[in-house]
Amino acid sequence: MRKPTLLLGLTVLITAGASFAAANLLLRNVAPASRSVAAAPPPLPGGVALAEPSPKFVGETRVLAMEAIDATAWAPMNQALVQLARRFLDYPFKGFSLDGGPKEQLVLDLTNFDCLLFVEQLLALSNSRKVDTQDEGVERFTQHVRRLRYVDGEVDYCRRQHYFSRWAEAAERNGYVVNLTPFLPGASSRTVPLNFMSNHIKSYKPMQLARNRQCITELEKDLVVNQPYIPLAALPGVLPSLRSGDIFALVTKVPGLDVTHVGFLEKRDGVIDAIHAAEGAGVIRSENFAKYAGRVQDVIGVAIYRPRPNDGGKGSVAKPGG
């Protein structure tokens, strides 16, 4: 998963499986949970955004995006997400892939993934399908990724959504997902300070730049979120309410972190599996989601998000400086 949720040294136990999706729709029109909003980003040091102005398409990403959009053009969204996830099975895992250059850049990469880039980019693709031309689809894909990845679409390390809870809250506010977690049986909640990055500065290459280090440290001084989650013991009772295409997040007890792994769920004949990008394994399918989640180190529960159709990439996404 994108840093910091890809915890250095954390071993994610993986099991491969073979099960495909078809599900009954439950909780169709759930309203977003009412909860406190995380702290706003501090002003950027010097007011200068250190970013490359143009998106970067890695390798064959543009072609892969066009093919994926065409192949899933008319499927319902939840089915399209599972179809997209299957297309990328066995693709390699790559951590820290957004931190390669001296300046932040909008990177589009469908050639390898970490777990959050897998979820983020497939969610963007699923909202870029019903278009007149392939170029329009790629443009919408680009704008959806920008909107999901950055606060107000501003491409800057200090504006990147580094923690999954903040990423998901923004995605919910912008109409991409609904957080089902508080409405599911057995739901609990906790208050979590998010300060892993400022406590592990040496693990983050961009934070060796004083300007980035300053803005992240300032942000995390008072960064606390209220995190609903399903304890592992309650997870079996939740499974009947889930469907293919739902997003899962593994909630962790690691200090300073909220989540250590994310992916998509698929359901067939009442069995819930996961498709996700796993360190050391690439994009895989893990059988029996409840058992899989229970084997991952330091996990105390899960959070569940249901994707929603969103046409916000059609000319309404904030651009840097706009």
Image: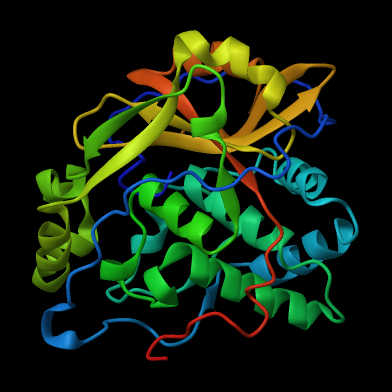
46 displayed left or right of 86: left
- Residue 210 sits in which quadrant? bottom left
179 displayed left or right of 128: left
256 or 52: nearer the viewer:
256
- Judged from this view, the residue extending furthest toward the bottom is 322
- Residue 139 sits in which quadrant? bottom right
Looking at the rendered image, the quarter that the N terminus falls into is top left
Answer above or below: position of 247 versus 214. above
Q: Residue at x 44, y 75 (%)?
A: 153
Residue 289 location in percent, x, y? 61, 19
Q: Looking at the image, can residue 211 be seen?
A: yes
Residue 37 location in percent, x, y? 32, 54
2 or 294: nearer the viewer:
294
Answer above or below: position of 137 versus 115. below
Q: Residue at x 17, y 60 (%)?
A: 219
Looking at the rendered image, the quarter that the C terminus falls into is bottom left
